[in-house]
Image (tube, rainbow, N blue to C red):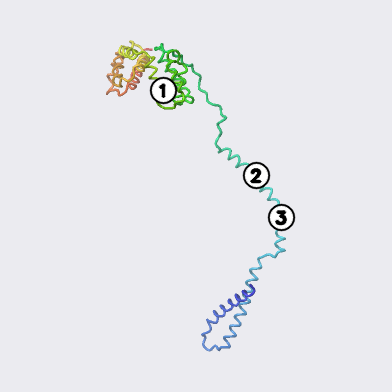
Amino acid sequence: MEGAAPSRRGGMRSRRSRSFSGLLGGYPGMSKGARERLGEAEDEEGEESEETEVATALAGVPEASEAENLAHSNQPLISQAEPNFLKMMEKMTQFMGQLTQAVAPRDNSKAPAFKTPSMKAPDSIYGAQAHKLRGFIQSCQLIFHNDPANFFSDRKKVLYSTSFLTGRAGKWIEPYLSNISNEDPSYLLNNWQLFETQLFTLFGDPKEVRKAEQELDNLRMKESGHVSLYIADFRSLMSRIGDWGERAYIHVYRRGLESRLLDQLASYPGNFDTLQELMDITLELDTRYHERQK
């Protein structure tokens, strides 16, 4: 390192000498001795310039004793700032904890479970009470719709319903219950539609559909009566008959309406596409009629 420094200074002097001498080296009439003296003067000037630059650079650097004094003089400020900094960090930690709790997913495992309103259990089906079978099925379906959390599968629905089968109906279901572990979707205990169909086939009234068709064919709205009652009876008979088709039901429904409603319907352009649309129109017309009668 000590040998490198002179080389650097020598290099700087050499460059400066060559630079300045180069400008005058070709000056006419300058002797060799004059050029040598000029080079020595440039070297001395370069050394003085370098020493000045180093001194200037080191002037801004404090000595070791001065640095220690500066640190001691600022020690009170550091001591005062440290407690405030710690308090600020503590508050930030508390805030982050509160923020984490606010955005964390809530645990609803301890929340009270929603309870649906209690409903009357269906009446037991003995098997020889065909006239009660439809009411039994409807009661079961109401319970299913009222409590979907418990009756979320066909298997849940069928097993619940089988608990009300007694007599002949109870004996019929026994073989299926003995194989209750069967999880085949087509198995009776796992298929509500199949279970319902079998109940009506075995224990329903074989003449029920024919009776319902005859009643619907003869159903008429009473004079000055309310169309809402007519609609209720009509829908009840439809549920016992099955699918006649939309056009057939529209035809039968119109035929049973009171003449005053038929006259008003005649002023409506076009045909009604659905039975529900026709029922809604007649209900609106009938409501206006009874309001005027008051």
Q: Is residue 269 left or right of residue 1?
A: left
- Kindly indicate the quadrant of the structure image that contains residue 48: bottom right
x 63%, y 41%: residue: 94
Residue type indicated by callout 3: Gln
Q: Which mark is residue 3?
A: none
- The nearer-to-camera label among 3 and 2 is 2
- The nearer-to-camera label among 1 and 3 is 1
Relative image position of residue 41 (x, y in whole percent): 61, 82
Relative image position of residue 53 (x, y in whole percent): 62, 72
Residue type indicated by callout 1: Leu
Residue type indicated by callout 2: Glu
- Kindly indicate the quadrant of the structure image that contains residue 44: bottom right
Residue position for label 3? 75
Q: In the rendered structure, which disc, 1 or 3, sits on the residue that comes first in sequence?
A: 3
Q: In the rendered structure, which disc, 3 or 2, sits on the residue that comes first in sequence?
A: 3
- Kindly indicate the quadrant of the structure image that contains residue 189: top left
Can the viewer see residue 225?
A: yes
x 29%, y 15%: residue: 255
Residue position for label 1? 188
Q: Nearer the viewer, residue 121 or 78?
A: 121
Q: Is residue 178 left or right of residue 111?
A: left
Q: In the rendered structure, which disc, 2 or 1, sits on the residue that comes first in sequence?
A: 2
- Above or below, 23 relative to 213: below
Distance Cα–Cα, label 2 vs label 1 = 66 Å
What SS does tag 3 mark?
A: helix
Relative image position of residue 211 (x, y in whole percent): 33, 12
Residue position for label 2? 90
What SS does tag 2 mark?
A: helix
